[in-house]
Amino acid sequence: MIPERERADVLIHLFSALFLLVPGMALVASAYRHAHATVTAVVVFVVVHAALHMLAVWRGAALHPVPQFLRTLHAYAAAVMFATTLLIIAISAAAATLSASACAVLLAGAMCQLSSLHTAARRLRHMLLALGSLLQFIAMTLLTLGVAY
């Protein structure tokens, strides 16, 4: 049973993880018609973000204490998401597939995630992480579908 004070946070991350996994797999499948760099960027994005959101769900719903490494990873989830965003921008820019609009939306999502680091309210922190992932998912979709060119 999930404690009452953590239930909303767990549900936020569960929705985010499911949102990234279910349409994310379709996004990965549609990316295969593009260059290898685009496929790599999409796979890295979907896997890292979904895994970090699922880690938050597991940490909030676990009956037993979570190992220290996973607690540390959860504490720095926003920094890991930001590093992933920089990696995606570098991969896409090197392949010359990154447009200015997709880059702007990726950075807007990264700013949401980075602003969650300095937020004292837990629920707002979790909402900013989810919002950042959502914005970045939209940018990855635009990048994959070629709409952002």
Image (cartoon, rainbow, N blue to C red):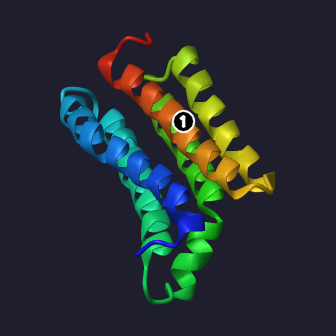
Q: Amino acid at mark 1?
A: Ile
Kindly identify the residue that appears in the image at 58 percent across and 58 percent down. 80
Left or right? Give the position of 121 relative to 56.
Answer: right
Task: Name the one closer to the observer, 133 or 103.
Answer: 133
Q: Is residue 17 visible to us here?
A: yes
Left or right? Give the position of 146 relative to 32.
Answer: right
Disc 1 is placed on an element classified as helix
Kindly identify the residue that appears in the image at 54 percent across and 44 percent down. 130
Q: Is residue 47 above or below residue 54?
A: above
Task: Name the one closer to the observer, 55 or 36.
Answer: 55
On the image, the x and y values in percent for residue 115 come to 75, 45
In the picture, which quadrant includes the C terminus? top left
Q: Is residue 121 above or below residue 112?
A: below
Task: Name the one closer to the observer, 116 or 27.
Answer: 116
On the image, the x and y values in percent for residue 136 come to 50, 34
Q: Residues within 10 Å of mark 1 (few under 14, many from 20)?
A: many
Q: Is residue 84 above or below residue 36?
A: below
On the image, the x and y values in percent for residue 42 come to 36, 39
Q: Is residue 94 visible to us here?
A: no
Location of residue 57 (image quadrant): bottom left
Query: Pointer 1: what residue?
Result: 89
Left or right? Give the position of 22 relative to 143.
Answer: left
